[in-house]
């Protein structure tokens, strides 16, 4: 069973995305800004991850954990509304986890997702406790050019960089 999280542009007040189920159901996601996979302050890298339920001491119940994240542990999928940069004075309900919501909005100058508990309930109902594979795709604009300006690195594992520095689809 595979779910696809398609990220949008990563900004100081969070990284919006959509989580798509095989039947076409879509939930909104909100994660921290990309900060080179730094624990507690960054979303995790795009990639393919096994997910399974485990007991969470922080939440006191079983939660889905995103496994095999290089240099990270305890990355959960849970309810929450904000994922801003705390070091910039913004609010965050995540320390690197994936937040789910039904809708999007703003609270002041910050991105939010809303109806998060309803989204978590729907997610739990659809998953039925089964393990799944999470495929996280980076924003189509999420590439960082290196200093020599001839090569580029895409945060999307589904894309490669050719000699001219432009991204091309992986074979």
Image: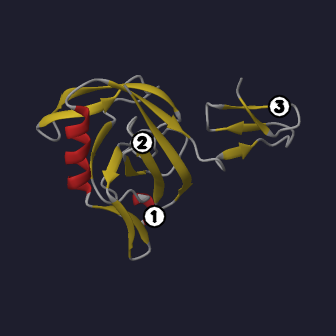
How far apart in space, not on screen, are marks 1 and 3 (Cα)? Answer: 36 Å
Residue indicated by mark 1: 88
Please tell me whether mark 2 or mark 1 is closer to you in this view. 2
Q: Could you say where residue 17 lies in the image, as x and y percent from the top left?
A: 47, 50
| Earlier sequence position, callout 2 versus callout 1 | 2
Residue indicated by mark 3: 162
Q: Residue at x 26, y 56 (%)?
A: 116
Left or right, residue 57 beside residue 20: left
Q: Secondary structure at mark 3?
A: loop
Instruction: Say few, some or many: other residues with alpha carbon within 10 Å of mark 3 (under 14 / 14 to 19 / 20 or more).
Output: some
Please tell me whether mark 1 or mark 3 is closer to you in this view. 3
| Earlier sequence position, callout 1 versus callout 3 | 1
Q: Is residue 67 visible?
A: yes
Q: Secondary structure at mark 1?
A: helix
In depth, the one of 24 and 2 nearer the eye is: 24
How far apart in space, not on screen, are marks 2 and 1 (Cα)? Answer: 31 Å
CB-based contact (under 8 Å), mark 2 and mark 1: no
Please tell me whether mark 2 or mark 3 is closer to you in this view. 2
In depth, the one of 84 and 130 nearer the eye is: 130
Q: Residue at x 81, y 43 (%)?
A: 147
Residue indicated by mark 2: 20
């Amino acid at each position: 069973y595979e779910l696809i999280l398609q990220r949008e542009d990563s900004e100081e007040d969070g990284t919006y995305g959509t989580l798509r189920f095989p039947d076409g159901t879509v939930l909104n996601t909100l994660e921290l800004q990309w900060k080179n996979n730094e624990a507690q302050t960054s979303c995790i890298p795009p990639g393919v991850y096994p997910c399974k339920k485990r007991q969470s001491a922080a939440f006191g119940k079983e939660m889905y954990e995103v496994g095999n994240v290089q240099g990270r542990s305890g990355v959960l999928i849970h309810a929450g509304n904000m994922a801003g940069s705390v070091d910039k004075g913004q609010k965050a309900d995540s320390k690197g986890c994936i937040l789910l919501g039904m809708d999007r909005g703003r609270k002041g100058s910050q991105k939010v997702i809303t109806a998060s508990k309803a989204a978590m309930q729907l997610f739990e109902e659809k998953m039925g406790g089964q393990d799944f594979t999470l495929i996280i795709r980076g924003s189509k604009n999420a590439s960082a050019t290196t200093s020599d300006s001839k090569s580029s690195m895409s945060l999307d594992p589904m894309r490669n960089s050719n000699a001219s520095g432009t991204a091309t689809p992986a074979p």
